[in-house]
Amino acid sequence: MKMKRLKTVKSILWALVGAAFAIAVFRFWRGLGPTTALTDLTPWGFWIGFDVMGGVALAAGGFIIAATVYIFHLERYRPILRPAVLTAFLGYSAVVVGLMFDLGLPWDIWHMIVFWNPHSPLFEVGWCVMLYLTVLLLEFLPVILEMSKHPVLAAVYHVLHKFTVPLVILGIMLSSLHQSSLGSLFLIMPHRLDPLWYTPILPILFFVSAVALGLMMVTTESLFSAWLYEEEYELDLLQGLGRVAAGVLWFYLALRLGDLAARGVLPHVLDGGFGPNLFLVEILWSVLIPATLLTIPATRKRMKTLAIAAGMTVSGMVFYRIDVGGLAMIESTGTRYVPSWTELTVSFGIVAGAALVFFWIAEHFHLMHGGPMIKGRERLPDVTNFRPRLIRGAVMFVSGAALATALLPNAAIDGWPVVAQTVHRPGYGDVMILDGNRNDKGVRFDHKMHADIVEGDDKCAYCHHMVKPGARATGCSECHKDEHLPTSIFDHRLHQELLAQGPGCLTCHEDTSKPKDLEHSKPCLDCHSSMIPAGAAFKPRESPNIGLAPGYMDAMHGLCLRCHTEQDGNSSTDAPTLARCSTCHSGVVKPFDPLHPDQRLAAPKKDDAPKGDDPKAE
Amino acid sequence: MSGPKGILTDVTKCIGCERCVQSCRMANDLGTVLPFRWLLDDGLSAVRWCSVLRKDGKFVRKQCMHCLQPACVSACPVGALQKTAEGPVIYDSDKCLGCRYCMMSCPFGIPRYDWESAVPYVRKCQMCYQGRVSKGVQPGCTAGCPTGATIFGDREDLLVEAKKRIADNPGRYLPTVFGESEVAGTSVLYLAPMQLDLLTLGNKLDERPMPGRTATAMSAVPPVFVGMGALMTGIYWIIERRMKAERERAAKNGTPPTDAHGHGAAGHHTHDGKEG
């Protein structure tokens, strides 16, 4: 069989589809995080910028050519009508498939039909995709059905054929909405989008550029299939499209620059730096060069220059959409998103799948000017007959899938949770002195014991990676919450009540005429001499410098080792709940509740109910 | 319930103890933060809905601003995000389909995503609406604050209180309440001695409500749709009528029919002469 070009191209496409399929399996199994480069700062990436924005744009050729032929009655463009409509259908299908990868919960996509928010541009985009995909299917279905002799299919064909013009008009209405509303999506992101791109007329710019893009997409496609199937180029037709596209491109440029001027940001174009330079490259690539090539008759009518102009317009306008969808946000948000190869492969795999469908239809149906591209296949497929090609495709598919799987990062295959792995022992052995709270006070820290107590796959991360601002590891107080209580252990009212008999205030305040401060009061240890166990490893500061009461942290550090040893194995009093005062002082001090920190300050009495939260809350 | 609720955070009173973060974590039963690639360095994540930023020795608590006219609510195509009458902007995971447009639209970059999950949802502060605020109890963060740096109350009362503090303490604060008019006002307000640009994302915001920016384009949808339909039908009808007349004339004169540009109707004919 001849057609070496075709075989090679198809093999590459099959491999891409296979690779995309393999990645798809892991994307749905392991989630978006491990299989993409998306972040909380860049929640939309290549799949939105290229698949959705680009796919819709590439499909613009469908409604443009349908309008040209059916509405404006320019019959000479009819030969490229069917491929254009098919491209639009496949483009939109690619958008939907791409969205299925990108959406976090793609199986819930039907929510768009049930739950409405008409204020959302994305709601409109969603409905337009659904409706226009249906319209395109109905517009294109006759091409398939006309091959069938089955009476029911033939009847459907005749009904659809009758409604061609209303369908085309509905398609144009939906397309003009959809092409523009893709621009409206970004109107709510003035904070993200560079002022060179952010403008209230984004929807209009998107629509106008889609017209030029649609015309050039049809041109590219026609030239490419002629090259691929080694047929004649339809240069006469295509240069007519090119002339119109040139006009649209110049109009688009005028709109773009006029808008910049009206908003007073035109001078910034020459500022240099990332944004302005990106803008210049984009304008040069998407408008200036192709529009010039298309305006000069000599270059417009030559195959090579026309192909260059068409390719530049198509890629340039997709470039424009990628700019709006992400590149023009880099400076304002400081994001450094680079699409992962998995994202790129999935995107190209979707395009490859669409291309394979296109070829298949071109080969079997009256899609192109001259009928089916491969003679002798003008019929619905016969399963027994295309096995050789199926095997070649399948081999490429499996190879692509295998290669992609082999290249996938571990995270995409194993999932993301931090898996326990061999780590070096802490430098000073299993027990070390560390300053967990960074207050220049070290404590003995039994690393091995903590590692044994904390369970689960993420046990190391439990302490080592809390990802708090400025923190390198978890402070002890994350678990040992009471350590950081302000020194509130001394309850003045309780002492007042207990000591009301006898000397009263003078029990502690040596001289009532002197200030009732640290210097002129009795240290706690004078009465509570048994407060510090004899075997405590750390001695709190001794009298008279002890203050009103030892800080709670001092008390804990002084007492914990002994109690922990004593209570070892007793789950009800073991760490970290041991740190509660009530473990020892049962019934006197309430357990600490972080949501009501102040309740501990008041001594609870039966008739003194704890106060509610902030009075403002009531 | 009186008016819509709000939170006032006084940056000068915050000691950076992060008890608000801890209380939030407990009130909402949030898990451990793991060192994921996709986290921002502001401390917020799918399992941390409030954090304390440190800048020049000041502590600024970051959380959802609960805008009066939220961008996320207008952006969500399925209405999974709603602004309640009490003030909190809440999220309904049963409606969400995971498009993440809310994350793109938020001018403060608040919503976060369960990237590591195969069934991911959007996560953000909901001002403890379900368990607390809807029952008249203040949110976990304000209840946990030991210094009263962040307090809960009616937004109107908090604004009065904020302005009183500005008047009573000359030089202590900038003379504006952050959140009073930014993006047409937020339920969460800040008093600070410095500009709070660190709470916003990207280009500087003005006082226009975010939903208003797409509203014009969205209101043009029905007229454009109908207008385009009418225009196309009209053009089709006029050209069709003219060509019909031409065809009849041609049939009379016996010359071959031509298309609108005068070229011969050449080209594509399918097997039965009909076109899809």
Image: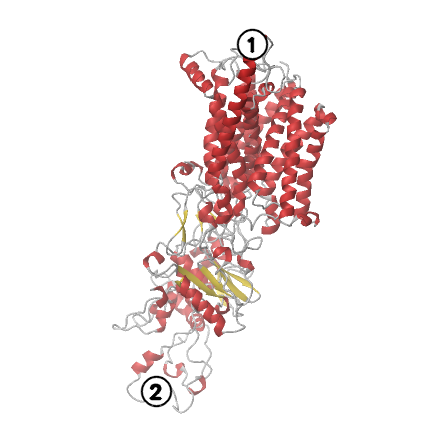
Kind of residue at disc 2? Cys
Subunit of mark 2? A
Q: Residue A478, position in %: x, y? A: 45, 61
Residue A353, can we see it? no
Q: Which mark is residue A418?
A: none
Instruction: Please tell me which residue lies in front, B227 or B215.
Output: B227
> Which residue position holds label 2?
A505
> Which residue position holds label 1?
B251
Instruction: Please tell me which residue lies in front, B162 or B91.
Output: B162
Kind of residue at disc 1? Ala
Q: Residue A385, position in %: x, y? A: 52, 13
Residue A446, can we see it? yes
Left or right: residue A291 versus residue A68 is right
Subunit of mark 1? B
Instruction: Please tell me which residue lies in front, B35 or B38.
Output: B38
Residue at (56%, 65%) from the top-left corner? B194
How is the structure coloured here?
Answer: secondary structure
Between the C-alphas of marks 1 and 2, the distance is 124 Å
